[in-house]
Amino acid sequence: MQSKQLPEYVAGMTWGWTGIRGTWNIPEAVHSMQEMKNALGVNWTAIALGALQDTAQSTEIHLGEQPTVTDAEVRWAIQEARSLGLHVCLKPVVNCADGTWRAHINFFDMDVPCEPKWSDWFASYTRFILHYAEIAEETGCEMLCIGCEMVQTDRRELEWRQLIREVRKVYSGLVTYNCDKYQENQVQWWDAVDIISSSGYYPIDSWEEQLDRIGPLVKLHGKPFFFMEAGCPSRTGSSQIPNDWGLAGEPSEEEQARYYNQMFQSCGQRDWISGFMLWDWPASLYEPGLAAANDDYCPYAKKAEHVIRSYYETKIQQTERREAP
């Protein structure tokens, strides 16, 4: 398959997670998205929403049910982002209602009578993704992310390839899959997507090692690559375990800013990295005066906000100069 190209360097931020019904298309959400654009200078956003299945061994995804945002809210968020001049990646994600991480969704390798089956799960998941693929096409989203950090499903190559074929029947934009950290080399069907992407939650002192590992994979496939997720909570200790959102520690803007500085320094030297869709920016923001006490991923009104904006401005300018006639 001929590689499709990104329209711009991905200077992006994930918005709206987890997509709780009633929290989009309200004044707080309008303010949030405008602040994201103004504070960070982003040119992309991932509109991210979650739907639920009951457990990691359930085979039915509850499409369109509470607490997931409505289709009207999804369309509003896409249109709001586009009105701000942003490219949009629609990112529908499946979570487990019992709190199990989606990476553990798993079934017997062979379909067995009286047991939950991969075939049933993928049938439900395909309906789920195609629903949002149609919305992405209708609203002109430049990219669709067809899955996020679904580690145990990654080995189901035939099912993923079939899903992607079905997606392309209804969606004409860029297709990506967001593999989990450390899993870039485990996905055997990267040739079927347009963009390779992963979650870059690597320890602050591990970035060079991990990029040395990922680089040859990207070169092998000859496709664009970006980090569909990356970031660090503003919390003491989080720079070493940035994927642990529940890590105990005191609020620390300095630690978050230090992490971003190191991540950008390492990644900025690799010309095969096409950007970031950072994690994350909620639909309802805290007051700026409360930023120092907030220990979550959102960089709003924190020291990391300035680090991100400066890096994004530089990368966008560099890309524009390279592409100028």
Image (cartoon, grey):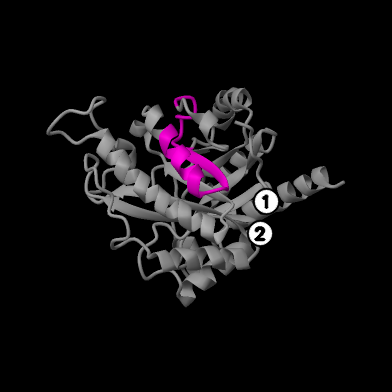
Kindly identify the amino acid type of the residue bearing the numbered disc 2: Gly
What is the span of residues highlighted in magenta in the rendered image? Answer: 161-186
Q: Is residue 276 left or right of residue 285?
A: right
What residue is at 24 percent from the left and 41 percent from the top?
Answer: 56
Q: Is residue 137 visible in the rendered structure shown here?
A: yes
Extreme residue in the front direction: 169
Q: In this rendering, is residue 111 above or below 265?
A: above
Residue with the most extreme bottom position: 27
Check disc 2: other Cα within 10 Å, few if <14, some if 14-19, many if 20+. Answer: many
Residue flagged by tag 1: what amino acid is it? Answer: Tyr
Q: Circle 2 is placed at which residue position?
A: 41
Seen at 81% across and 42% down, the residue is 322
Membership of 202 in magenta stretch: no
- Which residue corresponds to mark 1? 312
Mark 2 in CB contact with mark 1 (< 8 angstroms): yes
User: Residue placed at 76% from the left, 45% from the top?
Assistant: 319
Helix, strand or loop under label 1: helix
Question: Residue placed at 34% from the left, 44% from the top?
Answer: 125
Residue 198 x %, y %? 50, 37
Coordinates of residue 131 in the picture (x, y in percent):
40, 54
